[in-house]
Amino acid sequence: MNILEILNKNTIKDCGDLLVAVCHNASVHAGWWHDLTTGALKPVTQELVGDKLMLCVTELAEAKEGHRKDAMDSHLPNRSAIEVELADCVIRICDLAGRLELDLGGAIAEKLDYNSKRSDHTIAARMAPGGKKT
């Protein structure tokens, strides 16, 4: 039995919603969405969203480098660098989803369900010529 058979979509959605709320609220509290001079909430612009998305890419690049070096994190020395940088990426993604008022938890639940039923995601299909290998 796989995890999707154990948990229902609402449980997955609720977990995602909680993570989005916690990450976004922490970011708002730290002032990351406000103009430091005026204290005003920054408007959501294409540039702002693009910058936030590129910060996610940066975290992934740092995760790759940490994994390549088999390094431990410099701030959380009991954690591997890849582990912490992936956490940073998830935090940034959840923060952005919160600011954009996206239903990330619902989208994750639906996407996991969809992927679990895809014929091209079976082991046999992946082993076939031209199948997805990674």
Image (cartoon, rainbow, N blue to C red):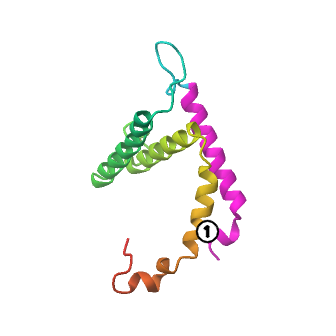
Q: Residue at x 48, y 19 (%)?
A: 35
Q: Amino acid at mark 1?
A: Asp
Which secondary structure, mark 1?
helix
Q: Is residue 128 above or below residue 20?
A: below
Q: Is residue 69 above or below residue 27?
A: below
- Res. 117 image quadrant: bottom right
Badge 1 density bin: few <14, some 14–19, many ≥20, Cα 10 Å: some
Residue 94 or residue 46, whichever sits in front: 46
Number of marks drawn: 1
Q: Is residue 54 above or below residue 104?
A: above
The percent coordinates of residue 103 (x first, y second) are 62, 49
- Is 83 included in the stretch rendered in magenta? no
Q: If the image is split into quadrants, where does the N terminus sit?
A: bottom right
Q: Residue at x 50, y 32 (%)?
A: 44
Q: Which residue is mark 1?
A: 113
The percent coordinates of residue 97 (x first, y second) are 55, 43
- Is 18 included in the stretch rendered in magenta? yes
Report the magenta residues as a range: 1-29
- Res. 21 image quadrant: top right
93 to the left or right of 57: right
